[in-house]
Amino acid sequence: MLYWIYDFWKSAFDAEKAAGTEGWAHTMSFLNLLGYITFRAAVACLLSFGLSILFGPRVIRRLISLKVGQPIRTAEEVHKLAELHGGKVGTPTMGGVLILGSVLASVLICARPFNPFVAVCACTMGALGLLGFMDDYTKVKKKNSDGVSARTKLFWQLVIGLIAACFLYFKTEISGFGAGPDMAGTVGYQFGNEPLKISQITFPLFKTPLIDLHWFVIPFYVAIIIGCSNAVNLTDGLDGLATGCTITVSLAYAGLAYLAGHHFMANDYLTIPYNPFVGELSVFLMALAGAGFGFLWFNCHPAKVFMGDTGSLAIGGAIGTAALCVKQELLLVIIGGVFVMEALSVMLQVGSFKLRKKRIFAMAPIHHHFELRGWHESQVIIRFWILSIMLALAGLALLKIV
């Protein structure tokens, strides 16, 4: 909406300038601000934060009235952890609807919603949010922690991830196919002075693409979207843990998207993949960060509401897709290191128990391991936030090492 206002103003301003007159467009020259991505990204962040704060209490009251309390696993399932988390029984879940609503509303107002990067991230987020909502609703209806079956959930994640990956691969503005060596007036990615295909994988420490996966990039991208979605879901086990890490990763990738959308910063200074359309994605990511701040207001310990799978699956899918759009998919392992650590702890725990009949951790995901080792819940949360901030800074620092 804001960019359409800018377009209308710019057309009137140019017409007045050509006619040699000064009308309303010259009087309202401050509307030029709406053309800047940085301004609209800041507005999106503040707007999504404000919407979350404004509607948060109403959403929480509504969820309580609908009796959608979070089912807590029994002592037979989690032993000592049931004692530590016993006070969380009845806390409303499905709070992710607040995040989704705030982000999508802010994006419609502040971003260019038909930008291919914004569109694919928003649609992926919405689709996975719907899947998460169905999972949360099933848990509440059954009054236990068993929601949609793992096989069904994985199937729909696969479908959503495949649609997003195919869109990225075949969409001309994104794929880079046919882009010339001089990107002026063309579309697609550029890496240095050479055109870059969507199928080529890069990393900041290398000034040339690492490998061209060709069409194999599609299953690779699907795996990233599904993996990131599930990793955020696994991280969402303590009050505010996943929300705080989401803010950190979103801010880092918002900066990456802005840099990747500007030719001088991307090509001449940092030598990272450049695409003239990707800068707009920073508006979406700043809206996600703002919604995260707003949700954290209610989700911090002791939480008044949980995001549930409605929020965690959607957020993970959005972050994973954004990393693909910016062409910094491998850097997500560092910037999103806490999410990766949580997912790896589960895989290692399951693998070790199946192969050796022994557990590596007291409990997985790893945040529960530290709880059972004597860390207070608030200590685990804040220390993981600190780690997430440090990892995000480390990832951004890699951009200018070579």
Image: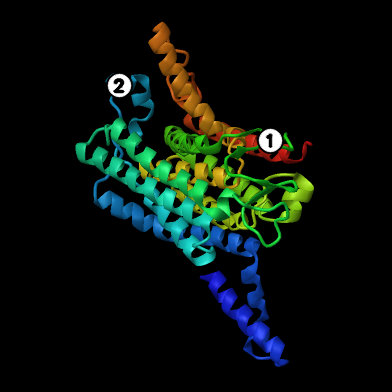
The residue under the point 49% across, 66% down is 109
Tell me which colouring the rendered structure shows.
rainbow
Label 1 crowd (10 A; few <14 / some 14-19 / many >=20) = some
**Amino acid beneath label 2:** Glu
The residue under the point 30% across, 28% down is 73
Q: Which residue is mark 2?
A: 77
Residue at the left extreme of this rendering: 142
Mark 1 or 2, which is nearer the eye? 1
Task: Measure the C-alpha gap from mark 1 to mark 2.
Answer: 38 Å
Residue 253 appears at what percent x and percent y? 60, 46
Q: Is residue 3 left or right of residue 194?
A: left
Query: For the image shown, how many numbered marks are present on the structure?
Result: 2
Q: Is residue 197 left or right of residue 106?
A: right
**Amino acid beneath label 1:** Ala
Q: Nearer the viewer, residue 45 or 78?
A: 45
Q: Quadrant of residue 19?
A: bottom right
Per the image, label 2 sits on a secondary structure element best described as: helix
Q: Nearer the viewer, residue 38 or 368?
A: 38
Residue 125 appears at what percent x and percent y? 43, 49
Q: Which residue is mark 1?
A: 394
In the rendered view, tell whether residue 170 sits above or below residue 32: above
- Please indicate, yes or no, whether residue 264 appears anywhere in the rendered image: yes
Q: Which of the image's four quarters has the C terminus? A: top right
The residue under the point 36% across, 41% down is 159
Q: Quadrant of residue 87?
A: top left
Label 2 crowd (10 A; few <14 / some 14-19 / many >=20) = few
